[in-house]
Amino acid sequence: MKQYKNEMDHLHWTQEGKENLIRRVKSNVEQVQPVRHCLSMGKYALVAAMICLFSVSAYATGILQSATDVLAPILGGTPVQTEIIEKIGRPIGASDTSDGITISADAIIGDSNNVCVVYSIENEDGTPFVLPDGISPQDVFFAGNSGTEFPFTAGGMNGSIGVQDNNGTDGILQIVEMLSSEKSLPLGKNVTAKFSQLSYFNTDGKVVPLSDGKWKLRYKLNFENVGVTIPVEKQFTRDSLTFTVNKIMISPIAIKANYTVIGIPNWSNSKSGKMPEQDQKEMYKFLEGIELIITKSDGTTIDLTESSGGGLSPEKDVTSGYKGAVLDEILPLNEIVSVTVGDIVIDINN
Amino acid sequence: MNANAQLEYLINTYADTVLRLSYSYLKNLQDAQDVSQTVFIKLFTDKRIFTSKDHEKAFILRVTANVCKDILKSPWKNRTCDIEHCNEIVAPNEETDNSILWAVNQLDDKYRTVIHLHYYEGYKANEISKIIAVPTPTVYTRLVRGREKLKKILGGE
């Protein structure tokens, strides 16, 4: 099959072709973006009203549920956790119906850089939303680009969207969206969430469409940010590289560490084939191998080293990095003793 | 890295990879070019960041595979080349009937795709399974059958 590789190598973009492709993509996106970002709220209300009049898909205001009722089954329902959710979580109540299915944004919780939004999926006519035999909520997903959209000023983002069933008896599923942002989130601003191509993986692992509906909800990024940022500025050395942990941000729902490294990754610049071993090693040295561990007052630890996301921005001779994660459960700040980033242990409650 | 710089990085790094997988799916250069544009628009408007280059590449290949599947379902495939964009890519030499690429292109798309991802991109069956969303045993079966069919096309070679 070496011959196949050689022959396929001949197929490539010319440099001019790549430059034209960059131009076309930018131009295409720029034609769409202003409509989404430049309308004033008044115009949005008008557009929303027109959609209500002329389309099957419509904006509506859902029945407001308490944030605690929505978030506790997902983020923990002990009395202490519930108290925190009541303090910082907020109900939303925006919904949209398409193809006979209503998706509602029910509640939100977050901090300066992280957000967890819980939505529900239910049939418009009130009948239970039932999945085919053998299919569990975890098999359900949105094959189209889905989730909350932020302006590019929010920087890089990572996150997940999963479907689950909180009580298994009411015929309503929940969508849990968790997002982490490189930069601060635009708290208090309205944002738009879109969902499309509701699908599931069947027992053969094939993608099967559940609905052709498209849903669009607009809601306010509203919650009490109780996250604390702790300046650190401490150094450690790893593999001959000097890391400076600049700061950590920690809240009951998430953690994020910012650091700088003297040196930049030595990428192989390989353009095809699997990620070269050299690049894997560099990624591990600069990001993946940096420990991120929470130590709790009962002595137990939450090791987020491998499960966290992050990013690297090499510039000249210095690399800026960040590493963070949304926690599986609400974690009261007074239960956290320390956070370990690389070799640096940061005391939290001193 | 700002959004424009990120787009330029993605296109300079992955445009050929996306083009080749699209071509192996669709056997049509114009469609492969269109798929490339669609894939990078999706990436440009997506706010995803990646923890590793492995993750980044696998995600881009998965998006490409999904766009190709959509086109295969569409009645509007197999269009002629738009002259304005014909000189943007260098086409492979596949017209001779002793070319492996020609032989691979005689296979069904389900075999072409796994053969491309395995032999060109170097992915294992379990990794291909995640990219094209089919079970790993099915990937193995397609690789074995694809190779058998290739041998027949190439005269038992």
Image (cartoon, coloured by chain):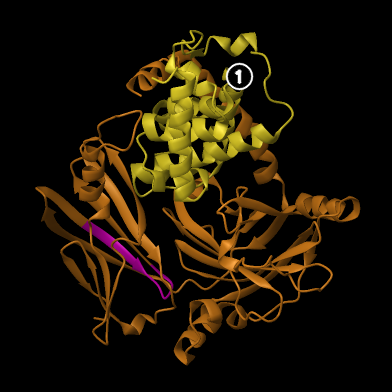
The residue range painted magenta reads A245-254
- Residue visible at 58% across and 26% down? B26
Chain B: what color?
yellow
- The crowding category of the residue bearing disc 1, from other C-alpha atoms within 10 Å (few below 14, some 14 to 19, many at least 20), is many
Q: What is the x, y in percent for residue A90?
A: 60, 75
Residue at the outermost right position: A53
Q: Quadrant of residue A336?
A: bottom left
Chain A: what color?
orange
Relative height, residue B95 to residue B103 (above, below): above
**Relative depth, front residue between B19 and A58:** B19
Q: Amino acid at mark 1?
A: Gln
* The C terminus of chain A - image quarter: bottom left
Residue at the outermost front position: B156
Relative height, residue A68 to residue A42 (above, below): below
Q: What is the x, y in percent for residue B62?
A: 50, 42
Residue wearing tag 1:
B30
Q: What is the x, y in percent for residue B3?
A: 47, 38
Q: Is residue A109 left or right of residue A327?
A: right
Q: Is residue B48 left or right of residue A125?
A: left
Q: Is residue A248 magenta?
A: yes
* The N terminus of chain A - image quarter: top left
